[in-house]
Image: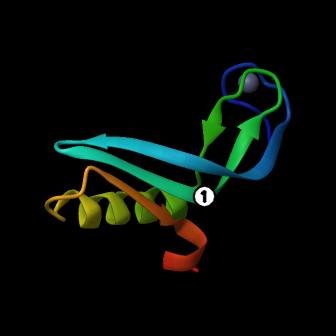
């Protein structure tokens, strides 16, 4: 597939997704994504984007942890 920004080729790889939430940060490792070889633009499939939202919701409601590091491949696959 091609990058939506610069039209270069995108490569399938696992990335680390970081999301700032109200009381901390959620770090999700090993997230399958497409990354542009030119500009670094990262694209997630609809399925993956939905899973990320679910995971973030789940961890956003967990009180008392400032940084949560989770493994996508272990939680979703
Ligand atoms: Zn690009």
* 9 to the left or right of 67: right
Please, is residue 75 above or below residue 16 in the view? below
Picture residue at 56% right of the left edge, 78% below the top: 74
- Count the labels in the image: 1
Quadrant containing the N terminus in the rendered view: top right
Picture residue at 26% right of the left edge, 50% below the top: 66
Residue at image mark 1: 31
Quadrant containing the C terminus in the rendered view: bottom right
10 Å crowding of disc 1: few (<14), some (14-19), many (20+) = many
Percent across and percent down for residue 72 are 54, 67
**Would residue 76 be visible to someone looking at this image?**
no
Quarter of the rendering containing residue 9 = top right
Element assignment for label 1: strand
* 67 to the left or right of 40: left
Picture residue at 59% right of the left edge, 55% below the top: 45
Quarter of the rendering containing residue 24 = top left
Q: Which of 33 and 14 is in front in this view?
A: 14
* 46 to the left or right of 58: right
Q: Which of 66 and 45 is in front in this view?
A: 66
């Amino acid at each position: 597939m091609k990058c939506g920004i610069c039209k270069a080729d995108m490569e399938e790889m696992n990335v680390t997704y970081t999301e700032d939430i109200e009381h901390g940060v959620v770090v999700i490792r090993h997230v399958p994504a497409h990354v542009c070889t030119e500009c670094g633009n990262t694209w997630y499939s609809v399925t993956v984007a939905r899973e990320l939202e679910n995971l973030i919701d789940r961890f956003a409601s967990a009180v008392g942890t400032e940084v949560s590091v989770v493994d996508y491949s272990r939680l979703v696959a």
